[in-house]
Image: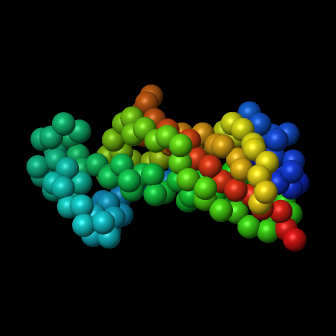
Amino acid sequence: MNIVVASPAALSNAIGASATGDWFAIDQERIQAFADATEDWQWIHLDAERAASGPFGATIAHGYLTLSLVPRLTDGLLSVGAVGMVVNYGLDKVRFLQPVTSGSRVRATVTLRAVETTALGERAALTVTVEIEGSERPALVAETLALFAPAP
């Protein structure tokens, strides 16, 4: 079930609520495209033959690729009505805990941790956990911040 609140001012009523998204596949084509976009062509990401005998048994997604998918993985998990704009306010902490091998599926869980009123709106602190299907350890845990400004 998604987190739904009527307005930015109502966000504090949802502190502690969580929502989990759908599974999303991380294939080698996406890993290659990310490598090309960031010019990070390490063998552990791109050389399937060498990676097969490496520490993870397959190529792995860049940690920053997994992090960059947080907006996609969390889309719709927190719905706030009467919003004029939502601004990515940043990250307080990110930990990459487990590599995502090519062909794996991941999904995110969002938990609303805190809300602070600012001059522009409500700044929400969220914990985002990206899990890997079939793995006990998550791929990453991030503490993210978003500013929800009310509609004029």
Which residue occupies 24% across, 67% down?
A: 39
In the drawing, does residue 31 fall left or right of residue 152?
left
In the drawing, does residue 79 fall left or right of residue 132?
right
Question: Eyeballing the image, is 108 above or below 89?
Answer: above
Q: Position of residue 54 (x, y in %)?
A: 15, 40
State which quarter of the image contains the C terminus: bottom right
Q: Position of residue 43 (x, y in %)?
A: 16, 54
Q: Position of residue 116 (x, y in %)?
A: 75, 44
**What's the coloring here?**
rainbow
Which residue occupies 56% across, 58% down?
A: 71
In the drawing, does residue 47 fall left or right of residue 86?
left
In the drawing, does residue 36 fall left or right of residue 95?
left
Q: Quadrant of residue 52?
A: top left
Outermost residue on the front side: it is 119
Q: Quadrant of residue 73?
A: bottom right
Q: Nearer the viewer, residue 133 or 148?
A: 148
Badge count: 0
Q: Is residue 18 visible?
A: no
Q: Position of residue 35 (x, y in %)?
A: 28, 64
Question: Eyeballing the image, is 132 above or below 31?
Answer: above
State which quarter of the image contains the N terminus: top right
Q: Is residue 70 visible?
A: yes
Which residue occupies 87% across, 48% down?
A: 10
